[in-house]
Image: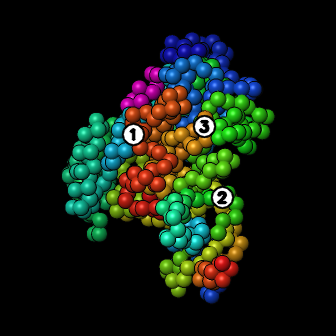
Amino acid sequence: MIINHPLLGPRDAQEFTYLGDASLLDRPDWQVPDAAQAFHDYLYLRDNPAGDHRELWFHEQGDRSWLVVTRNTLTHEILNVELARDVAKARRAAQ
Amino acid sequence: MRYSALRLIKEAVTGHKGWTPQWRDVAPQDHYDYVIIGGGGHGLATAYYLAKEFGGARIAVLEKGWIGGGNVGRNTTIIRSNYLLDGNEPFYEFSLKLWEGLEQDLNYNAMVSQRGILNLVHTDAQRDAARRRGNAMILNGSDAELLDTEGVRKLYPFLNFDNARFPIKGGLLHRRGGTVRHDAVAWGYARGADSRGVDIIQNCEVTGFRIENGKVLGVETSRGYIGAKKVGVSVAGSSSRVMAQAGMRLPIESHVLQAFVSEGLKPFIPGVITYGAGHFYCSQSDKGGLVFGGDIDMYNTYAQRGNLPVVEDVIESGMSLIPALGRARLLRSWGGIMDMSMDGSPFIDKTHIEGLYFNGGWCYGGFKATPAAGFCFAHLLKTDRPHETATAYRLDRFMTGHMIDEKGQGAQPNLH
């Protein structure tokens, strides 16, 4: 697989390590009353879709940036690549 | 029809005209007592033990393709009982004991071959860990033997003992482990279940559950609605997709594990070897092919094929352990989709929906568990209580803090 890095251009997926679903960016609030349940769901439960999947990749052998890659889990086709910090900032701005 | 040597001779002299199909091709009925979703090893074993051990009810196995077409046909055929943790080892020991009596029980040649599994160690720390694991195995009724370098050399003289970085310092030998003809496991259970009245319905994909007031009433399928008192889901690899139809999210990610077979060679590797310094394991099939594998591909996928970086990693590990491997040609490679759970251990449990039961999350250890998973899932379906060897495989264990993390990796499925 080739990941089209927003800053560095096309890079081999071997340069990256994989973390998982991009929902891991949405860390729950630890002060809410049902925080234990929220953290359980955040940490352990996954949608695990067959199809388009937004996921976190880390450019460990490169510029050490975190990316949000949208990839089809049935075909391995990569549809979109964003810097995770841009995604996180946009989410925070939207809240 | 009972199989025997006498029967084979009789058929041989009469032109093999007397063999009958091993299971019937049936149309689904309107209602069953038990519907098992998934006609793989686990689903068929569940139906078999439900019919045999837990009383004759009306049972159906629904399979979206053909039986045995999933992971039971795509694994590296290894059986073993060499786990460390209390939640696991009694279960896998129960499974190995069922394997040992399987062929007589099923009257089916599954080629169960207890040729021994050797886990190599390369450092003092690994030897300590192997000794501890061996003791845990023995305490649970399994067998383990700690070999030194010379002991390993007697069994496998061709290994790369003097690797500068990872010299072989010994190994933990589990003599009762071995290999099984994997397809025959699915077929044997299918034949056994069918002969006890189980309806095996192929080309029947479940498209939804009918759930009212928190109770499951039946399943919608590509061949119409089928009512059921109890529904057991046993579809490892697709667990998240099927359970999503019941509105559930699971502590599971789907990953691909690749496996490889070389061209046929003369007898070379008598047992199963696992490398301690890289993720690599190897055995030789009765046809002569070296069967080996290594790590998963590390990213979520439902494609039954992997990518080249893992191929390279597996072959490099293999070459560093068995240099002679370089002279063999690779015949084929393939990938199977694993339910990778958050602690590397499986689930055999009720769900919050009455009448809906779940068996999955087997990571890449599902094949060896087939008999016990079937037995324990059947036990749960019949009695609503977990079997005594499977009490730890609960869906709520992450909430209650009772993880079974053999590898100690935490909630990172691709590292288990």
Q: Residue at x 54, y 45 (%)?
A: B360
Q: Please, what secondary structure does the residue beneath circle 3 have?
A: loop
Residue bearing the label numbered 3: B354
Mark seen at residue B92: 1
The chain carrying label 2 is A
Q: Residue B324 occupies which quadrant of the picture?
A: bottom left
Residue type at numbered disc 1: Tyr
Q: Residues within 10 Å of mark 2 (few under 14, many from 20)?
A: many
Disc number lying in front (3 or 2): 3
Measuring from the top left, give residue B177's x and y in whole percent.
36, 39
Residue bearing the label numbered 2: A49
Count of marks overlaid on the render: 3
Please tell me whether residue B51 belongs to the stretch shown in magenta: no
Q: Residue at x 69, y 67 (%)?
A: A77
Q: Residues within 10 Å of mark 1 (few under 14, many from 20)?
A: many
Please tell me whether residue B103 belongs to the stretch shown in magenta: yes
Q: Is residue B19 above or below residue B242?
A: above
**Separation of disc 2 and disc 1 at Cα?**
30 Å
**Which residues make up the magenta segment?**
B97-105
